Amino acid sequence: MIQIVKTIMPKALFYTVLIGSLLLTSCKQKENEVNDGTDQVDMSVLKKEIASRLRDYENNLRNGDSIALGAMYMEDAEIIPSTVGRENIVKAFGAMIRDGITGSSFKTVGLWGNDQLLVEEGTGEWSHESGQVVGRGRYLLVWQKDNGEWKILRDTWFPEKTD
């Protein structure tokens, strides 16, 4: 019995190390293939797509359509820090619209990512239906492609200090 263990153990160890090495090597090659930059994304096209989505956002707010605004967000989206899920996002926009905030204007200042996931930095403002600006600031949005359409996965707003 001891002789069998002495014969089998070195072979088993050899094959375990061999298989592990092959797996690690193939994973490393796959990682390099993904990150080697050969699948460059045309950021100018993505910027135009996001600009179009921002205009949709502004139009939906102007039209007082909280359902259409909510549909621009992924089902599991978050408006950080406290609004989680599309249903709650629709309710939050409904409350804003009832308060008369139906104007907005957004401008992208930075965009990073690929054709499936983008991070957008921008500046913007919110305004009352009378035209009075009620808030200015910066924002970060994480956009994710969902069935060929860009939707917001994460949203956060950093208001300007008014001191």
Image (cartoon, rainbow, N blue to C red):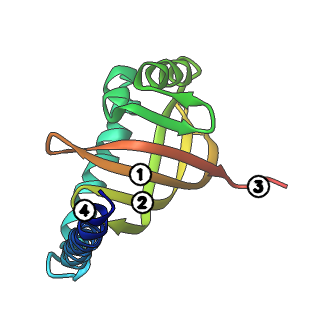
In space, the residues marked 4 and 3 are separated at their CA atoms by: 77 Å
Binning the other alpha carbons within 10 Å of mark 4 as few (below 14), some (14 to 19) or many (20 upward) gives: few
- Indicate the amino acid at tag 1: Val
Evaluate whether residue 23 shows in this view: no
In space, the residues marked 3 and 2 are separated at their CA atoms by: 21 Å
In the picture, the disc for residue 4 is 4
Find out whether the residues at labels 2 and 1 contact each other: C-beta distance under 8 Å. Answer: yes
Task: Return the disc, 4 or 3, that comes first in the chain's sequence.
Answer: 4
Binning the other alpha carbons within 10 Å of mark 3 as few (below 14), some (14 to 19) or many (20 upward) gives: few
Q: Which of label 2 and label 4 is nearer to you?
A: 4
Q: Which of label 1 and label 4 is nearer to you?
A: 4
Q: Which of label 4 and label 3 is nearer to you?
A: 4
Would you name the residue on which mark 2 appears? 120
- Indicate the amino acid at tag 2: Glu
Task: Return the disc, 2 or 4, that comes first in the chain's sequence.
Answer: 4
| Residue at x 25%, y 62% (from the top left corner) | 4
Binning the other alpha carbons within 10 Å of mark 2 as few (below 14), some (14 to 19) or many (20 upward) gives: many
Q: Secondary structure at mark 3?
A: loop
Would you name the residue on which mark 1 appears? 142
Task: Return the disc, 1 or 4, that comes first in the chain's sequence.
Answer: 4
Q: Secondary structure at mark 1?
A: strand
Question: Which one is in front, 124 or 15?
Answer: 15
In space, the residues marked 2 and 1 are separated at their CA atoms by: 6 Å
Evaluate whether residue 21 shows in this view: yes
Q: Secondary structure at mark 4?
A: helix
Q: Please tell me in which quadrant of the rendered image residue 137 appears.
A: bottom right
In space, the residues marked 1 and 3 are separated at their CA atoms by: 24 Å
